[in-house]
Image (cartoon, grey):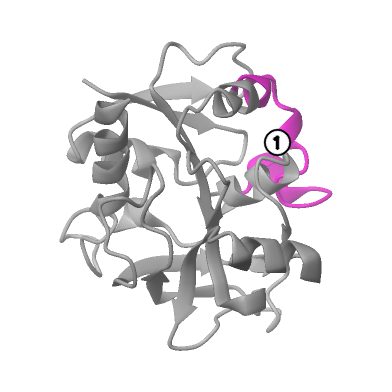
Amino acid sequence: MTRIGVVTFPGSLDDQDARRAVELCGAEPVALWHDAVDLGGVDAVILPGGFSYGDYLRCGAIARFSPIMTEVVAAAGRGMPVLGICNGFQVLCESHLLPGALVRNDRLTFVCRDQKLRVENNTTAWTNDFAAGQEITIVLKNGEGSYMADDETLARLEGEGLVAFRYVGGNPNGSRNDIAGITNPRGNVVGLMPHPEHNVEELTGPSLDGQGFFRSVEAFLARV
């Protein structure tokens, strides 16, 4: 059975939700503490949403120095699938596993809504269950979710097909180019602001589209 580690930082909010989503989708969730110095033999890693270290300095800026992140960065370099959700996306950017940064929403308020996304890249470890151009609905909840990058970085993301998801039906936070999530060139590291772990069962809705992320990584790992 696929073993997927979910990291808990001080201030993580959605780590239990992520572990539940992993289990519901047929894999074995493994709790990983931020102070651990190894990944416990997992096959993939999820950095969950929340407010790691209280979002002091910048979102994700302290979490990047956690001992566990040394291992995550090394494993990602070897090709291990890593998914960063919301605060986890911020940690991935701060750790330089993904380019750019997440800053305060342009409307200066916390946004919480069911958000429509378009799948722009369906070839990654976390998106291969979707069709290119497919529109999905995923819960969005953030106060600092505006994706920013310089013009050169944006041109590279667009030119190399590294935008994984784009907001549809209105930009909720001022992200450049309506970017909701991106991937690294290898396709094993993906970060996005919306929360797929909240969309895996009918009880919490608004869709079951989040299941596609977990089916994708299972299929990816089955091929390697």
40 left or right, relative to 68: left
Q: Position of residue 178 (x, y in %)?
A: 57, 77
State the residue lying farthest toward the front: 159
- Numbered disc 1: secondary structure: helix
Of residues 167 and 139, the one drawn nearer to the viewer in this rendering: 167
Of residues 151 and 174, the one drawn nearer to the viewer in this rendering: 151
Q: Is residue 196 magenta?
A: no
User: Can residue 150 be seen at all in this image of the molecule?
Assistant: no
Density class for disc 1 (Cα within 10 Å; few <14, some 14-19, many ≥20) is: many
Q: Which residue is mark 1?
A: 63
State the residue lying farthest toward the right: 57
Of residues 64 and 76, the one drawn nearer to the viewer in this rendering: 76
150 left or right, relative to 175: right
Which quadrant would residue 205 be assigned to in this image?
bottom left
Seen at 39% across and 42% down, the residue is 125
Q: Is residue 37 above or below residue 50?
A: above
Seen at 65% across and 50% down, the residue is 90
Looking at the figure, which quarter contains the C terminus?
top left
What amino acid is found at the position of numbered circle 1 in the picture?
Ala
Q: Position of residue 60 (x, y in %)?
A: 70, 45
User: Can residue 71 be seen at all in this image of the molecule?
Assistant: yes
Q: Position of residue 98 (x, y in %)?
A: 65, 47
117 left or right, relative to 3: right
Seen at 55% across and 41% down, the residue is 12
Q: Is residue 118 above or below residue 44?
A: below
Looking at the figure, which quarter contains the N terminus?
top left
The magenta span reads: 51-71
